[in-house]
């Protein structure tokens, strides 16, 4: 039988292969028209009236939806 105590435990964890970046901030606005004219890439924008999340696209200089809208038609 082996007794494990705090004094005889050594553990090393290599975190170099993990993505430790923080998730983006989520900011809520009552409507999409209330979003700032220029967004920030590290944020998710939520239009509360639509219930839709958006992200800022620097290349398009506009907000882009994160979820495609399904119209209920054929696929």
Image (spheres, rainbow, N blue to C red):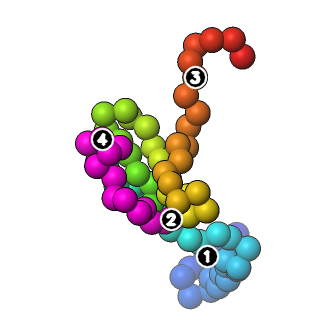
Say which label, 2 or 4, has the lower sequence index.
4
Dot 1, how many residues are within 10 Å of its Cα: few (below 14), some (14-19), or many (20+)? few
Q: Give the percent coordinates (x, y) of residue 12.
A: 67, 83
Residue 59 appears in the rendering: yes
Residue sticking out furthest to the left: 30
With 13 as the anchor, is 50 left or right in this view?
Answer: left
Residue pointed to by mark 2:
41
Say which label, 3 or 4, has the lower sequence index.
4
Q: Give the percent coordinates (x, y) of residue 48.
A: 31, 38
Residue pointed to by mark 4:
31
Residue 23 appears in the rendering: no
Say which label, 3 or 1, has the lower sequence index.
1
Residue pointed to by mark 1:
4
Q: Is residue 35 above or below residue 12?
A: above
Cα–Cα span, label 2 and label 1: 48 Å
Residue pointed to by mark 3:
70
Disc number lying in front (3 or 1) = 3
Dot 4, how many residues are within 10 Å of its Cα: few (below 14), some (14-19), or many (20+)? some
Disc number lying in front (1 or 4) = 4
Cα–Cα span, label 2 and label 4: 19 Å
**Residue depicted at x 56% and y 37%:** 67
Disc number lying in front (2 or 1) = 2
Residue sticking out furthest to the bottom: 7
**Residue depicted at x 55% and y 28%:** 69
Say which label, 2 or 1, has the lower sequence index.
1
């Amino acid at each position: 039988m082996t007794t494990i105590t705090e004094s005889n435990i050594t553990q090393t964890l290599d975190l170099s292969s993990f993505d430790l970046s923080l998730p983006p901030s989520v900011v809520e606005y009552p409507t999409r028209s209330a979003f700032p004219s220029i967004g920030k890439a590290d944020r998710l924008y939520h239009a509360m009236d639509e219930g839709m999340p958006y992200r800022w696209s620097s290349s398009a200089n506009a907000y882009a939806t994160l979820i495609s809208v399904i119209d209920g038609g054929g696929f």
